[in-house]
Amino acid sequence: MAYESTINFTFDTICPWTYIAKKRLDIALERVRATNPPVIFTYHFSPYILHSTLSTAGQDKYAWYQTEKFNSSPELMGKYTSALSALGRTVNISFKHTGTIASTFPAHRVFQYTQSHHGPLVTDKLLMALYRMYFEEEAHPSSHETLVRGLVEAGVEKGEAERVVSEEGLWEGETKRAVQEQVGNGVDSVPVVSVEGRRRDLEFVGAREVEGYVKGLETVIKESQ
């Protein structure tokens, strides 16, 4: 009987490192699953809010990063965007650095609802859709339009998508508790990937290389027998 391992992926949709990590982890999973291992790996997605002071309306992303992260230095900002773009290309991400940065709580609320009602596969599709829209298409990270579009792309019926996004109190309390749970677990940055094992859980903080994730998954497989 196969051992069932949950991969807890703690993320924020405006964190580029979580997008890179998710792409790399998916590649690692594809490689490992191709060997037909005696372990079934399933995602669980946990919310984390990197910048709690951002408004839902948002502000210019490029200007915010340059001011808040790089001391208003155009040179440092330029180096960052160049380096991030180069990393993105290694996993087929075409990073754009303009657009709007805003609170991601509305997105996390929709994620928690989706995970509860539609399961990990649909939630995975929603996550990848929102990552692509925000980082590659310059969409607002949590606007009504973005969230509805992401849900529909993930396979949720349009009427349900509109209702879930519009009802702002829906899964609000559950989402706040889920965020606080990650804070209580000591999370202070993302991504954090925790892979459940029979003997022990393995934790990866930050965006690891594909081979690092492969090694971890193979360890869980080995120790499951």
Image: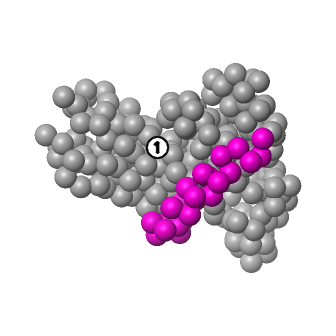
Asked if the stretch drawn in magenta spans residue 182, the answer is yes
Horizontal side of residue 72 vs 114, given as left or right: right
Rendered residue at 65%/46% (across/down): 171
Residue most toward the left?
225
> Which one is nearer the viewer's eye here, 65 or 59?
59
Rendered residue at 55%/38% (across/down): 115
For badge 1, the amino acid type reads His
Horizontal side of residue 44 vs 40, given as left or right: right
User: Residues in magenta?
Assistant: 167-190
Give the labeled residue for mark 1.
Answer: 44
Q: Is residue 136 visible?
A: no
The location of residue 1, given as percent across then percent down, is 19, 28
The location of residue 53, given as percent across then percent down, is 75, 68
Q: Residues within 10 Å of mark 1 (few under 14, many from 20)?
A: some
User: Which image quadrant is residue 35 in?
Assistant: top left
The location of residue 175, given as percent across then percent down, is 62, 52
> Which one is nearer the viewer's eye here, 63 or 139?
139
Rendered residue at 62%/40% (across/down): 113
Q: Quadrant of the C terminus?
A: top left
User: Which image quadrant is residue 162 in?
Assistant: top right
